Image: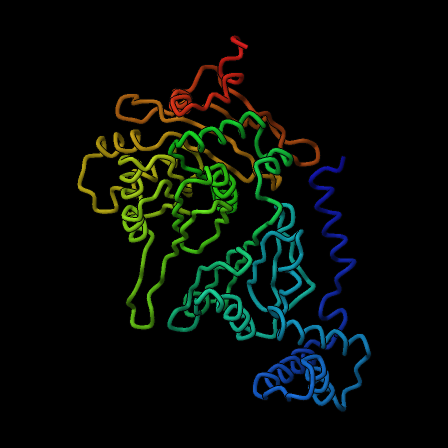
Amino acid sequence: MKTLREAFDIKVRERKQNVLSDYEIFPDKKLLDKLRTEIIENLIDNEMPSNVSLTEWINDEIDKTIEGYDLTNLERSHLFNLIDNEINGYGPISELLEDDNITEIMINSPDEIYIEIDGQLVKDESVSFINDEHIIRTVQRLIEPMGRVIDASMPMVDSRLEDGSRINAVIPPLSTKGPVVTIRKFKENMTSIDELIRIGTLTPYMARFLDAAVRGKLNMIVCGGTGSGKTTLLNILSGFIQDNERIITIEDAAELKLNQSHVISLETRTVNYEAEGEITIRDLVINSLRMRPDRIIVGEVRGSEAFDMLQAMNTGHDGSLTTLHANSPADALNRLETMVLMGGIDIPIKAVREYIISAIDVIVNIERMSDGRRKVTSIVELENFSGDEIKLKEIFAFKQKGLTDKGEVDGEFILYKGVPKVYKKIKARGINDLDDIFYPEEK
């Protein structure tokens, strides 16, 4: 069996062998960019004749533009592909978006583009943009179907793409080096708990516990760092919700893809040109309580909406799910406390903690390890108070022992002894699926 590093090296090597860069095919960079610019501008400025096809129109424009230049057949063919991607796709990154091996695309400048393959970053030499304006034009095309805009008056955008991928773009004056774009691609194959088990993210016991916890309507937080897989895990957990429940999802950019029949998806709105009309996560959480939800799923809690989410969990909306950016369950609790207090809620810290402990049942921590793989490193329940602090009790964990000679994380998953108190809540809803895990001596 190939190691993760060997698999990564093979994919990168195959990509370099199969995909030549713009300037390997067309060595004269200045000429290539000049021709690309001229052809694109002519196509944009002129209307396509009614008696020709799009392919014929592009070919005719290319032939007129390159007249007098001594181009090889390969150079002309490559130029056609670049222009075709501009018209029918998303410019230079069209093929990157279609490559299933690539999970993230990072554009730092016209000639500095990085991709993530198997959790590892590599600079991609196969594509380039003409200039900063070309990058911005491509971003505008990507976000236009979602009703989002980016320009000098609104120089930052965070949106989803039509396939569910996530795009974040920052342009001058916010970015001093020019447009910076990050696209996190939606992976179709990462939609089941079985797939997470197969790649070693968690164990079958952990998967069964999470399944039962969702069906048992426990309130849960998924926490982790940037790129750890929080949203992917949240999406998979949401799939365990029964089909007869009314689910309301609340996100900045709708990424969750639920298959249940009764799903209402709400998405925030940024300010318009007059700096009006903003609808925040908090606004949507408050409004969702008036929509008779059985479940509320918030893509990510990161501000004053934390108190409203806790309030929903404490007032009969069991089974709510959300993610939170934190490096551990303990860190998640600290951040939750801070967000509640920063939201202008004038109550003592002890009262905030009591509110949290009565609202949250389980915290699931997921990490991207040093070798690029994701692991559910901790599943904990909120047990009680130890002094003034909330005491956490671990149910499952992943303990790293070190690294192998090939740089892969070496460790083991642990099931802690004792029956979690949350299992009693699960059993109270008639779900006894986990008796063989927590009462093995009785089996």
Q: Is residue 68 left or right of residue 396?
A: right
How far across and how far down the image is residue 438, in percent?
49, 16
How far across and how far down the image is residue 1, in percent?
76, 35
The answer to whether residue 177 is seen in the rendering is no
- Quarter of the figure with residue 165: bottom right
Q: Quadrant of the C terminus?
A: top right
Q: Is residue 76 left or right of residue 313?
A: right
Q: In this view, does 240 lie above or below 143?
A: above
**Residue pushed farthest left?**
346
Q: Please tell me how many numbered marks the rendered image carries.
A: 0
Q: Residue at x 80, y 74 (%)?
A: 74
How far across and how far down the image is residue 138, in percent?
55, 70
The answer to whether residue 30 is seen in the rendering is yes
Q: Nearer the viewer, residue 155 or 203?
A: 203
Q: Which of 414 and 187 is in front in this view?
A: 187
Q: Is residue 424 above or below residue 112?
A: above
User: Colour scheme in the image?
Assistant: rainbow
Q: Residue at x 52, y 33 (%)?
A: 376
Q: Residue at x 52, y 38 (%)?
A: 367
